[in-house]
Amino acid sequence: MRLRPGEVEVGGWRVVAAREVVGWLWDAAGTVVGRPRVIGIDGRGGAGKSTLAERFRRLVPGSAVVHTDDVAWHHACFDWGGLLVENVLRPLHRGEAVDYRPEAWIARGRPGSISVPAGAEVVWVEGTGVIREELAPWLDASVYLQGDLGAQERLLAARDGDSAGQREQVASWLREELPFMARERPWDRATAIVAGPPHLEHDADTELIVGGVAR
């Protein structure tokens, strides 16, 4: 498996029921009172973060998903931690609803908002770079999707296109992503490691491929 510099394959890959993984994360998050559990999902573009977050959302009634790409939109590749804390994570920890329109949304006329209703059981916060030291106090548990960089790049190209402009955009992203990930090492911080994309036969509707031992 081709990984980022400094990243080591966790090994011990095995098929686990998705509900069991949710149980690990729930237990790792511990008891919280008056607010939702907040669980991060990290990994490279093409790893399957959004898909995994949606699967978890369907498994846990009353849960919600926040995409860090929405916070970062027309702002910065990775320098969005403060915005996420002040406008999403801090309100969630106070047990409040979230209804946040980033300045870039307002300036460019993007409709809607980043919203989470009050009373959610768990909020899945997904995005590359969410498992970082800056956000550690705000995450109750986390998942890192580890996968072969080549496979992730192919999925990203299939999703977003492979034009010259898109390739330059990906190259620009990588110039920031690689040193950021090497510094933050989300694979070392994560509660659980999930294969992204999966590389063992499994039921894509009910099972995940998990590596190592859940912390």
Image (spheres, grey):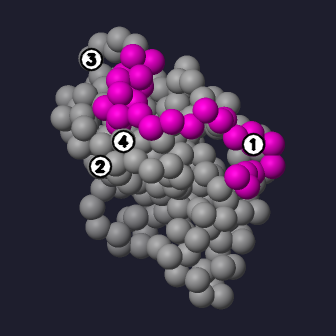
- For the view shown, which residue lies furthest in the front direction? 201
Q: Nearer the viewer, mark 2 or mark 3?
A: 2
Magenta stretch contains residue 5: yes
Mark 2 to mark 1 CA distance (whole Å): 28 Å
Identify residue for label 2. 205
Residue 7: mark: 1
Mark 3 to mark 4 CA distance (whole Å): 31 Å
Identify residue for label 3. 34
Sequence-wise first label, 3 or 1: 1
Q: Which region shows up in magenta?
A: 1-29
Sequence-wise first label, 3 or 4: 3
46 or 170: nearer the viewer: 46
Magenta stretch contains residue 137: no
Disc 4 marks which amino acid?
A: Glu
Kindly identify the residue that appears in the image at 70 percent across and 52 percent down. Answer: 1
Q: Nearer the viewer, mark 3 or mark 4?
A: 4
Judged from the image, the secondary structure of the residue bearing numbered disc 1 is loop
Q: Tell me residue 21's x, y (percent).
A: 40, 30
Q: Tell me residue 76's x, y (percent).
A: 60, 59
Against 18, residue 213 (above or below) is: above
Q: Nearer the viewer, mark 3 or mark 1?
A: 1
Disc 3 marks which amino acid?
A: Gly
Can residue 148 be seen from the camera position used here? Answer: yes
Mark 4 to mark 1 CA distance (whole Å): 25 Å
Identify residue for label 4. 207
68 or 213: nearer the viewer: 213
> Do labels 4 and 2 touch, CB within 8 Å?
yes
Q: Residues within 10 Å of mark 4 (few under 14, many from 20)?
A: some
